[in-house]
Image (cartoon, rainbow, N blue to C red):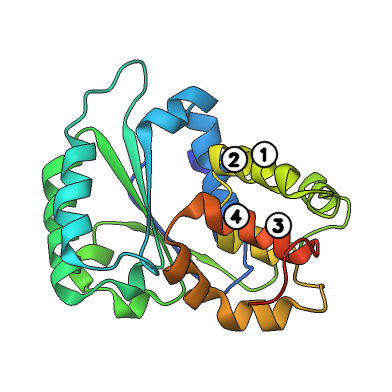
Amino acid sequence: MESFINNANVPHILLYGGSNSGKKTNLEKLLNSIYTKEQKKLYTMYIHCSICKGIKVIRDDIKDFAKQQIHQVPFKSIVIYDAELLTIDAQYSLRRCIEVYSKNTRFFIVTHNKDKLINPICSRFVQIYHPNNYTHSENDPCVIEIKQMKSLVDCIDTAEKYYNEGIYGDILLEKYIDHKDYIYFKFHYESICHELKNEKWILFYILAFFNGLIQNK
């Protein structure tokens, strides 16, 4: 990944490996080297296949985003999390989108299991494996900050901030890996995502839950 930072000639990239292996962290470093904060809001689209995995999102939402004009940036970016959950029809639709919009759009796939992706997709990406040796530090500013939420208003403000910085629920959740309720929350995480269906609310819920500001579901 380091070789692509500050390099306008970025290919489509597929990052794969287990949970908490640093895939998303490294991808965000790359995106932050390409865009300013405001540019990132305009020119980066995130798709969470744990919530939306059907053909409609791929066919319609990606198409609408990819058709937007760009200014003062080398390309737009479409980040697809948990791509292994896409239906086969959605994967073939994604392959078509990659073929059509590659001139001004880069696709980044983050997956636990690339073997569940069709070969015509995998063959179009530079594949980067992340082994399960990524750890977080108690000195990480994010780890310190998320333990200091005093009110629901703090959680709302922090969720908004993290969302704008490209930090999403599954990234934030791993910061609480040493918390006594981590396993409980991890078990229910997918159902919580399906119920909330909004990444900012997911961030808010995680912050509020682990700071004892809301009760267990």
The answer to whether residue 7 shows anywhere in this view is no
Determine contact: label 4, label 3, CB under 8 Å.
yes
* Marker disc for residue 71: none
Q: Secondary structure at mark 4?
A: helix
Mark 1 / mark 4, whichever is N-terminal:
1
Give the image location of residue 82, x and y in percent: 41, 68
The residue lying at 21 percent from left, 72 percent from top is: 119
Mark 1 vs mark 4, CA separation in Å: 10 Å
Density class for disc 3 (Cα within 10 Å; few <14, some 14-19, many ≥20) is many
Mark 2 / mark 4, whichever is N-terminal:
2
In this rendered view, identify the residue nearer to me: 197 or 133: 197
Mark 2 vs mark 1, CA separation in Å: 5 Å
Please name the amino acid that badge 1 sits on: Asp
Residue 37 lies left or right of residue 153; in this view the side is: left
Q: Secondary structure at mark 3?
A: helix
The quarter holding residue 185 reads bottom right
Mark 1 vs mark 3, CA separation in Å: 11 Å
Please name the amino acid that badge 4 sits on: Leu
Give the image location of residue 81, x and y in percent: 42, 61
Q: Is residue 216 above or below residue 137?
A: below
In this rendered view, identify the residue nearer to me: 33 or 64: 64
Determine contact: label 2, label 1, CB under 8 Å.
yes
Density class for disc 1 (Cα within 10 Å; few <14, some 14-19, many ≥20) is few
Q: Which residue is mark 3?
A: 207
Mark 4 vs mark 3, CA separation in Å: 6 Å
Mark 2 vs mark 4, CA separation in Å: 8 Å
The quarter holding residue 169 reads bottom right
